[in-house]
């Protein structure tokens, strides 16, 4: 087993401000960035705040920025860095810092609450829902989300624009709207109300997304957020808006 000393630069501070602190830390074969952060806590910085839980890439807690890129600390192997390279670990930039590497991600929970849940079809009892396997598989991809919020953090619409947060749900939650929009049994639009795609556009800021795909690039679950959720949602929103028959139909239904 080989061991070496790595130079780590870790952001220390709180909501009032902070700075990067340098540490030299032992690294062993097979370790990930979270292991090194834990060793730092144990040996040199006992009060270093870090959020984590599973250490298996499944709880979504250990999100941070490593050399400027949003990543899970527990899934980032030290072997991807050169041994002489300084590894810089900073908190997620799009959310307010609580302390050190811990950010307040409550923005995301607020956005989740803004999306009305699945509306069951009328006259079909629970347990009697039926849908085609192809529809199950389509939404299954989105269900892999671990809510790490790396996509939310990286999207330029909110990353440097706090003022957009009110109007924009972010890729994770637009993906949730897309999932409901693709659900063959969702009856949210029954009775002439807006479709999920329309409300994505009008209520959740889908129009802010200019499909840069940065969200997709950082997703640790490799969900094709842009291609499989956001672009189809945009197409469906636009189809309805500019199709004269759909437009006329919705006007008549709303009377
Ligand atoms: Fe994380 Fe991917 Fe879910 Fe976004 S879609 S919160 S990046 S798992
Ligand atoms: Fe943002 Fe992803 Fe769209 S990064 S701009 S939500 S494609
Ligand atoms: Fe759970 Fe990293 S500790 S995803």
Image (cartoon, helix red, strand yellow):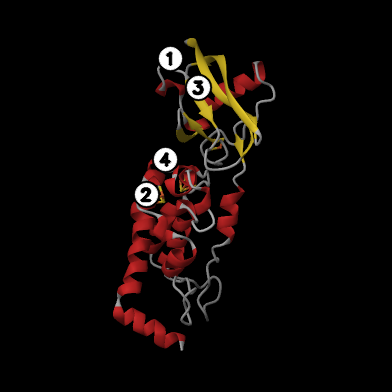
Which of the two discs, 2 and 3, sits closer to the camera?
2
Q: Which residue is mark 4?
A: 218
Residue 30 shows up from this direction: no
Q: CA distance from mark 1 to mark 4?
A: 24 Å
Q: Residue at 66%, 34% (x, y): give it.
A: 16
Ligand 3 rendered quadrant: top right
Q: Residues within 10 Å of mark 3 (few under 14, many from 20)?
A: some
Q: Residue at 56%, 51% (x, y): give it.
A: 108
Q: Residue at 35%, 51% (x, y): give it.
A: 211
Q: Residues within 10 Å of mark 1 (few under 14, many from 20)?
A: some
Question: Which of the two discs, 1 and 4, labels the residue nearer the N terminus?
Answer: 1
Relative image position of residue 32 (x, y in whole percent): 50, 25
Question: Which of the two discs, 4 and 3, labels the residue nearer the N terminus?
Answer: 3
Q: Which residue is mark 1?
A: 83
Question: Which of the two discs, 3 and 1, labels the residue nearer the N terminus?
Answer: 3
Closest to the observer, 242 or 180: 242
Q: Secondary structure at mark 2?
A: loop
Question: Which of the two discs, 2 and 3, labels the residue nearer the N terminus?
Answer: 3
Q: Which residue is mark 2?
A: 224
Q: Which of the 4 image quadrants contains residue 183?
A: bottom left
**Looking at the image, residue 236 lies above or below residue 142:** below
Q: CA distance from mark 2 to mark 3?
A: 28 Å
Relative image position of residue 115 (x, y in whole percent): 54, 63
Question: Which of the two discs, 1 and 2, labels the residue nearer the N terminus?
Answer: 1
């Amino acid at each position: 087993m080989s061991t070496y000393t790595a130079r780590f630069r870790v952001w220390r501070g709180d909501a009032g401000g902070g700075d990067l602190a340098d540490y030299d830390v032992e690294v062993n074969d097979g370790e990930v960035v979270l292991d090194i952060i834990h060793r730092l806590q144990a040996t040199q910085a006992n009060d270093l705040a870090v959020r984590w839980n599973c250490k298996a890439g499944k709880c979504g807690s250990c999100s941070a920025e490593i050399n400027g890129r949003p990543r899970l600390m527990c899934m980032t192997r030290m072997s991807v860095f050169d041994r002489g390279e300084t590894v810089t670990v900073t908190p997620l930039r799009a959310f307010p810092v609580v302390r050190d590497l811990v950010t307040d991600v409550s923005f995301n929970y607020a956005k989740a609450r803004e999306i009305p849940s699945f509306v069951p079809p009328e006259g079909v009892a629970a347990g009697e829902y039926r849908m085609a396997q192809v529809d199950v598989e389509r939404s299954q991809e989105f269900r892999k989300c671990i809510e790490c919020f790396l996509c939310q953090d990286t999207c330029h619409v909110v990353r440097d624009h706090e003022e957009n947060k009110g109007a924009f749900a972010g890729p994770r939650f637009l993906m949730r709207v897309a999932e409901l929009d693709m659900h063959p049994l969702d009856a949210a639009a029954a009775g002439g109300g807006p479709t999920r795609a329309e409300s994505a556009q009008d209520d959740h800021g889908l129009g802010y997304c200019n499909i840069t795909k940065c969200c997709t690039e950082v997703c640790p679950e490799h969900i094709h957020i842009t291609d499989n959720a956001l672009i189809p949602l945009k197409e469906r929103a636009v189809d309805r808006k500019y199709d004269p028959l759909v437009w006329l139909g919705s006007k008549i239904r709303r009377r």
